[in-house]
């Protein structure tokens, strides 16, 4: 798949809750190419600071391409200042997408922590067409990290939420939501994205219960093309780059801590 670098127009840039934003941009060429689990590399400023592009999982790709992000660093704070009509320098789609579940799968459980929910909406957009039982287990630190998730619910996704302080949903970690789902090793498939300790808990649970799945890994990136090797992680098959070999890896292949 060829990568496209182009300048697109911002369509909207909305704050979904205290911590998270959703930015959409008009990129018809990207819409034809992007798949769930892939990301785009965005230059947040026309100058030299910040120097590197920032990677963002594609949140949705329908009429426009959408990204989901938290404005917490120099690059993302610049991104949050963009308004309708502003130019946006984008490279993508990048990375290896999710593998879609086999036809014998009846239930898909998406398990996400914080900003790790980003690649799950576009995934649910695809999977809803297969009439699967779709579930999202989402963990956030506080109410500030939880938004309505209407689009998931419109896709028929059953949403369960946990927060560290109990301000929304169950008090505890996302692993405390596992009991909300009847997992079956024969027809359940897991997708997960979020902090490594959370994904490690998901990996351990999946291994114990013989459930297959995939993990979308997150690392700081420079080139986004697999050249600089700065985002390498350890897998059972040696070191792999998140930007090129991933972000999507088989859940039982990545070495998580």
Image (tube, rainbow, N blue to C red):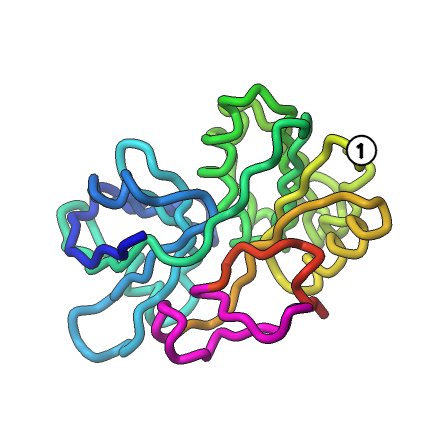
Residue 240 among those drawn in magenta: yes
How many marks can you see? 1
Q: Is residue 183 visible?
A: no
Residue at the image point whose x is 62% and y is 33% from the top: 102
Looking at the picture, tell me which residue is in the foreground, 132 or 117.
Answer: 132
Which residue, as the protein is rendered here, is positioned at the far right? 208
Res. 40 image quadrant: bottom left
Is residue 17 shown left or right of residue 88?
Answer: right
For the C terminus, the image quarter is bottom right
Q: Which residue is mark 1?
A: 184
Q: Which residues are magenta?
A: 222-244
Image location of residue 202, percent across then percent down: 73, 52
Picture residue at 34% right of the left edge, 38% below the top: 61
227 vs 18, left or right, is left
Q: Is residue 225 above or below residue 118?
A: below
Q: Is residue 237 magenta?
A: yes
- What secondary structure is the magenta-colored segment mainly? loop
At label 1, counting other C-alpha atoms closer than 10 Å, the crowd grade (few under 14, some 14-19, many 20 or more) is some
């Amino acid at each position: 798949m060829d990568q496209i670098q182009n300048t697109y127009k911002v369509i909207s840039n909305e704050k979904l809750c205290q911590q998270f934003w959703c930015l959409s941009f008009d990129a018809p060429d990207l819409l034809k190419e992007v798949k769930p689990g892939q990301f785009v590399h965005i230059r947040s400023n026309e100058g030299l600071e910040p120097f590197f592009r920032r990677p963002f999982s594609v949140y949705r790709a329908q009429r426009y391409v959408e990204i989901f992000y938290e404005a917490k660093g120099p690059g993302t704070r610049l991104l949050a200042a963009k308004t309708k009509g502003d130019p946006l320098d984008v490279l993508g789609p990048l990375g290896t997408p999710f593998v879609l579940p086999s036809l014998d799968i009846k239930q898909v459980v998406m398990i996400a922590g914080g900003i790790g929910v980003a690649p799950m909406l576009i995934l649910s957009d695809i999977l809803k067409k297969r009439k699967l039982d779709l579930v999202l287990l989402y963990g956030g630190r506080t109410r500030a990290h939880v938004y309505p998730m209407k689009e998931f619910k419109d896709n028929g996704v059953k949403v369960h939420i946990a927060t560290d302080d109990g301000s929304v949903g169950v008090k505890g970690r996302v692993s405390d939501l596992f009991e909300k789902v009847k997992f079956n090793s024969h027809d359940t498939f897991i997708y997960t994205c979020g902090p490594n300790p959370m994904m490690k808990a998901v990996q351990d649970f999946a291994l114990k219960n013989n459930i297959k799945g995939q993990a979308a890994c997150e690392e700081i990136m420079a080139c986004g093309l697999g050249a600089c090797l700065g985002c390498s992680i350890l897998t059972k098959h040696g070191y792999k780059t998140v930007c090129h070999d991933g972000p999507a890896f088989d859940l039982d292949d990545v070495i998580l801590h």
